Amino acid sequence: MKREFEIKKVNSILNNLIENSSLKEGLNNAKIQTIWKKTMGDNINSYTSEITLKKHTLYINLSSSVLREELSYGKEKIIKLLNEELNAKIIRKIILR
């Protein structure tokens, strides 16, 4: 009896492993932290203390109430920018704290 093996690319195998495990949420958190810093710039990052993604909701802790108020007006634009950088609709809601 001969066994037939399907040849797969390593990338494909890793993507399947990530999709079917809890690694995906951790990797998305790491990506979003990097993208937030890149997209929002140094000024906003200096007031950002924590960035967490849980179930399509992005939680941002800010040390400035003035900045929190200002960013609250542009939540939809921020969601759009971050999702474009991620090349996926991962973020559906932002909560600024």
Image (spheres, helix red, strand yellow):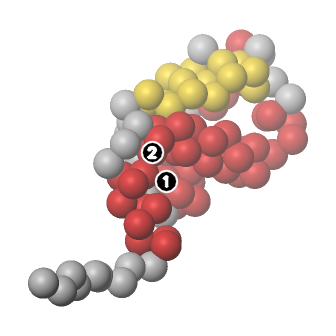
Residue 88 point in image, percent of width and height: 42, 58
Q: Does 56 sit above or below residue 49? A: below
Give the residue at x 42% y 51%: 18
Q: Amino acid at mark 2?
A: Lys
Q: Does 71 sit above or below residue 68? A: below
Residue 74 seen by the camera: no
Q: Nearer the viewer, residue 28 or 82?
A: 28
Between the residue at mark 2 and the residue at mark 1, the CA separation in whole angstroms equals 16 Å
Whether residue 1 sits left or right of residue 50 in the image: it is left
Q: Residue furthest front?
A: 1
Across the whole image, how many numbered discs are drawn on residues?
Answer: 2
Q: Nearer the viewer, residue 61 or 32?
A: 32
Q: Which residue is mark 1?
A: 83
Q: Nearer the viewer, mark 2 or mark 1?
A: 2
The image quarter in which residue 9 lies:
bottom left
Whether residue 11 sits left or right of residue 6 in the image: it is right
Q: Amino acid at mark 1?
A: Asn
Give the residue at x 56% y 50%: 82
Whether residue 39 sits left or right of residue 81 in the image: it is right
Residue 67 seen by the camera: yes
| Pointer 2 or 1: first along the chain | 2
The image quarter in which residue 43 lies:
top right
Residues packed near mark 1 inside 10 Å, few (<14), some (14 to 19) or many (20 plus): some
Q: Which residue is mark 2?
A: 24
Give the residue at x 77% y 16%: 64
Residue 37 point in image, percent of width and height: 75, 44
Residue 78 point in image, percent of width and height: 56, 44
Residues packed near mark 2 inside 10 Å, few (<14), some (14 to 19) or many (20 plus): some
Mark 2 lies on a secondary structure that is helix
Give the residue at x 57% y 27%: 52
